[in-house]
Amino acid sequence: MALTKKSKFEDQYIDPVGKSVPRIEGRGIVTGQLKYVFDVQMANMLVGKMLRSPHAHARIISIDTSKAEALPGVKAIVTAKDTHQIKFGSNEYFFPHTVDQMALEADKVRYIGDEVAAVAAIDEETADEALRLIDVKYEILPGVFEIEEAIKPGAPQIHESLNNIALILPVNFGNPERLMKEADHVREDKFWCPVAHPSPMEPHVCVGQWETFTNKITLWSSSQAPFKCREALAKTLKMDLNDVRVIKMAVGGGFGGKLEMLPMDFAACLLSKKAGGLPVKISLTREEEFTTTRRKHGMIYKIKTGVKKDGTILAMTGEVLADGGAYCSYGPTVLAAAMMRIFMVYKLQHFRMTGYRVYTNNPISGAMRGFGGVQSGFAVESHMDMIAKDLGMDAVEFRLKNITGPNMTTVNKMILTTNGLRECIEKAVIASGWKEKRGKQKAIKRGIGIGIAADVMGSKMYKSHESAGAIVKVEEDGSVYLFTGAADTGQGSNTALSQIAAHALGVSFSRIKCKSGDTEITPFDTGSFASRVTFISGNAALLGGRDAKLQVLEIVAKDNDLNIDDLDIKAEKVIYKKDGRVLMSFDKALELCYSFKYGKQIIGRGSYNPKTTPIDFRSGEGNVSGSYGFEAQIAEVEVDTDTGIVKVLQLWDAHDIGKAINPQSVEGQIEGSLAMGIGYTFYEDLRFKNGRVLNANFAGYRVPRSIGLPKMNSILVETDELEGPFGAKGMGEAALLPTAAAIANAVEDAIGVRIKELPITPDKIIKALKEQKA
Amino acid sequence: MNVNLTINKKQHTLNLKGNETLLEVLRDHLSLTGTKTACQETECGTCTVMIKGKAVLSCITLAANIQGEEITTIEGLAQGDVLHPVQQAFIDYGSVQCGFCIPGMIMSSVALLEKNPKPTQEEIEYALDGNICRCAGYPKIFEAIHEAGKNIVSKGSIASKS
């Protein structure tokens, strides 16, 4: 068995796991050649537009489309009459009554922007003119816009639910009332967590095509969850899953906002059908993006904690009121997550919290990066700091006394195996110089603050299973194709999953190409959310790579009369394990597989379903995730007490990521999260008046820009998760969770004032300083 | 009306109404979809191209007003297979995530470095203030620009790192 000459794949990307390999789409991105749905151009493609309610709350009396239909260039108009009027929603498995939105509303509109009709025309001007010509008669109803107003008896009724409460979610463990009485100190606080907006750079866009003769639908969608999108389309259009194909192209960011389908996705398909099968493209404007796509829930977060003198937390109670807006969306599970994340972070046995998801005539609240955890992160971590201060304890010491650890089952039956929270705190404390700085820089109005958090790696709150699949196809020329259902929305999952598959197969990353998120071609995957992709889809890629490897080895073993168990493929070579001898190159082994003699196609497959139990929402119990990630974040700030301006000097984020598949990508996720966290802390605040968004553009809704961001320090803590692919955990959201609290805690350390309502604006600082003096 | 545009060193004669923006012409008439837009109202920088070496927002530039001027888009930076140093640095430093803002980000960076190959951190931050990136949080974009600048200086002119 002579060695063949060195393969072109014996490069620096052998054994790619743990290496910062460049993004698989890198060249496409930097040359402008990568195609997003936004870039799709097709022959005879029509321009679609949505007709939206100008009223926050109104009954639809009639819709007359005759004038618009008569306009030359208009090819199709659809209203609720053209739909099956089947409702869609995102928590139908656990909370079926919260499935409450229709593709096009038939009887009532519930917020400014609610979709009542859609048009398709030959160009944008014609489509706009057609929208103007549709005559909708409304009976305007009184609206309600504040959480605490909406739940009052007699408030305008938005849906059927009593007092506009879509859902009451109690979480009860132990006997907190008794323990509160035993506590040496009890503290109660109330926080306001404002409405942020995901605002990905690519606004929502889709192209729908309904092949009228074969009755098949194709939707090109900028989606985080193409398979969920297919499911919702099939259900509401009464089609079989396999008659609906959803294709995700490159996605220009999602951050939770593209997790669900929107009425525009249905409308594009329905319009195409009416237009005889011509493709219809609907692109939202930035204003529509801000006003009619999912936003973060605004939350009133009330929390009360009883502690012993030594800092041990005895009991916690609270109440969360979430402004849900007009429909439920992912609201029920966001609410659950906002209350239950705390069990991953702190040892709690006695806990009672009740969540209320409240309908208002505001735009629809849904998923956004952090999924309830940004709100609870701010409230809980601010509250913890204040308790430590009350007790005269150091904020770090207080946390270390109460945090969870490895191999621990929480009160609600989450099974924490690897848990690097303590190590994260210790590393962040050392890196930031906490001990030298905390409480010691008041003279120069500088302060330092900490926040800690934990996150799931997927969540079985949504569906009966949460599996991911992968196919690893090895071609005759040695190139490898990874097919994954996972939706890369920019985080780099195509790259990370390819690294995992290549490593598992024993070959260089350079061999790999990745096709993701096409429901007709790739295996099923629930989508990009809950920081699940590296962990769950990564495990599928791992199994797929291993399976392909075994198929190659089977042929090598057969041809050489060897036992397959004695063989392995490592770093591009087939190895005889007993003595480490190189038997042949991977290329040579493939030649054998694809030889006249064997003609064996190598198609590896992987399917992975995490070892979890669904949450029982009556008890609050369930091991929702197959693994949990942890982090500690420290912020150092300087406050100008004349202007009220807070400058963040540095941020440290120590993160238990199990194992960094691609350290550069992990840092990218941390830095992006920290920037978003800074935005939420200081200025990301979608504002409303009577249901109308007041700042629906990037001038009014500021997002982080290049000027003045602090130095960001990422500290990767590798705990080697047994269940993770090569030890990895997920990394999409956690670094955003404690940022606001870490900063608010640092402000308190610097100037002694506490901001409990985000965003932290100069005028709030000035006002607080005045009150402090008084 | 006939409008003559020089885009990426290539001449185009287009029959236009006259009210088309450069962005529309690039994307809809010439299928140069590398130039994106995220707001169409000058706030995001995603549509940035270079005109006579300056970073310009194509969403508010009338195509008919820039006849004969040298227009460079993201498609015009690489020389054959060889990427522009800024493009290469954006890959090497992991500066790209979703990538939607990146063409505009790169055009602003190239315009800066062509004038000032050794910008300070502050100069970079100010040059990119008009370009929003929602994914990456900027540090890796800054690193790439510093690095690309070094490359440009060392060769005396825009030349690719081999």
Image (cartoon, rainbow, N blue to C red):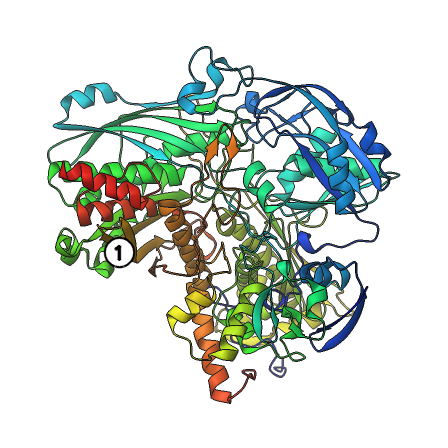
Q: Quarter of the image holding residue A720?
A: bottom left
Image coordinates for residue A502, horizontal then vertical, percent: 56, 64
Front-lying residue, A351 or A417: A351
- Amino acid type of disc 1? Ala
Residue A229 visible within the image:
yes
Which residue is farthest top?
A154
Image coordinates for residue A350, horizontal then vertical, percent: 26, 26
The reply, left or right, for residue A339 in relation to residue A423 is right
The reply, left or right, for residue A531 in relation to residue B63 is left
Image coordinates for residue A686, horizontal then vertical, percent: 46, 39
- Residue, disc 1: A428
Front-lying residue, A279 or A529: A279
Q: Quarter of the image holding residue A72?
A: top right
Q: Residue at x 56, y 56 (%)?
A: B42
Quadrant holding the N terminus of chain A: bottom right
Front-lying residue, A15 or B104: B104
Front-lying residue, A697 or A571: A697
Image coordinates for residue A746, horizontal then vertical, percent: 23, 49
Q: Residue at x 61, y 20 (%)?
A: A58
Disc 1 element:
helix
Please report, as a chain letter, where disc 1 is located. A
Residue A18 visible within the image:
no
The reply, left or right, for residue A90 in relation to residue A106 is left
Q: Quarter of the image holding residue B120?
A: bottom left
